[in-house]
């Protein structure tokens, strides 16, 4: 069972560790990544965003420390990026990413004033892209044109249809 936890300053080091690990494993940690991972409260939470964490539990008891995390980061009035979503290697295959994504989408649907929810990724992240497509994200050239330059590794941009998403 996956338990979702809200952001706390005590969990901030896990946000950095989990994300830095997968980014460094596949890409290069870019200056934008470093800033957000080093200052998650300032860059995301205090700016109106959300950071969630996942812990695997069995019979209500944590089996591990935090094993996954993800965020909704405000990038402009009414626009949020689903970002910094990662799961520790040892917890992959346990539906942690799916549970995190579901919880983040629930938060997005409940947020007042959110008009656009998008994500930026790389075609190298095939499993993540499949997860996003399964959840209802659509590939979007306009999102790529507007936000794609945020990361050098970005060659895939997707938008979540909040207006037609189930609540």
Image: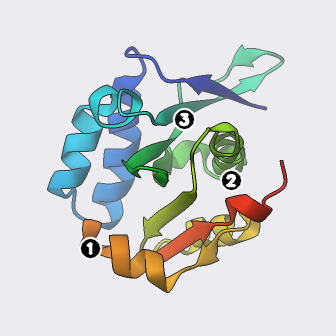
Name the one closer to the observer, 143 or 15.
Answer: 143
Structural crowding at the residue carrying mark 2, measured as other residues with C-alpha within 10 Å and reported as few (<14), some (14–19) or many (≥20): few
Marks 1 and 3 sit apart, C-alpha to C-alpha, by 29 Å
Q: Which mark is residue 93?
A: 2
> Which residue is depicted at the point 69% across and 58% down?
162
Q: Which residue is mark 3?
A: 67
Image location (x, y in percent) of residue 115: 57, 56
> Which residue is depicted at the point 43% across and 33% down?
48
Image location (x, y in percent) of residue 11: 43, 21
Query: In front: mark 1 or mark 3?
Result: 1
Q: Which residue is mark 1?
A: 149
- Asked if residue 82 shows in the view, the reply is yes
> Which residue is depicted at the point 83% across and 47% down?
167
Q: Residue 29's quadrant in the figure?
A: bottom left
Marks 2 and 3 sit apart, C-alpha to C-alpha, by 12 Å
Label located before the other in sequence (2 or 1): 2
């Amino acid at each position: 069972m996956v338990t979702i936890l809200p952001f706390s300053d005590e969990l901030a080091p896990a946000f950095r560790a989990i994300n830095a690990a997968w980014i460094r494993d596949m890409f290069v940690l870019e200056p934008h990544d470093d800033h957000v991972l080093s200052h998650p409260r300032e860059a995301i939470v205090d700016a109106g965003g959300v950071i969630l964490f996942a812990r695997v539990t069995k019979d209500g008891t944590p089996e591990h420390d935090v094993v996954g995390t993800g965020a909704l980061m405000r990038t402009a009035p009414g626009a949020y990026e689903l970002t910094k979503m990662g799961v520790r290697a040892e917890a992959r295959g346990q539906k942690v990413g799916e549970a995190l994504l579901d919880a983040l989408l629930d938060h997005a649907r409940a947020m007042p004033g959110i008009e656009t929810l998008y994500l930026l990724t790389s075609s190298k992240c095939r499993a993540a892209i499949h997860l996003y497509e399964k959840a209802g994200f659509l590939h979007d050239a306009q999102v790529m044109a507007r936000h794609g330059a945020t990361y050098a590794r970005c060659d895939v941009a997707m938008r979540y249809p909040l207006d037609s998403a189930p609540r």
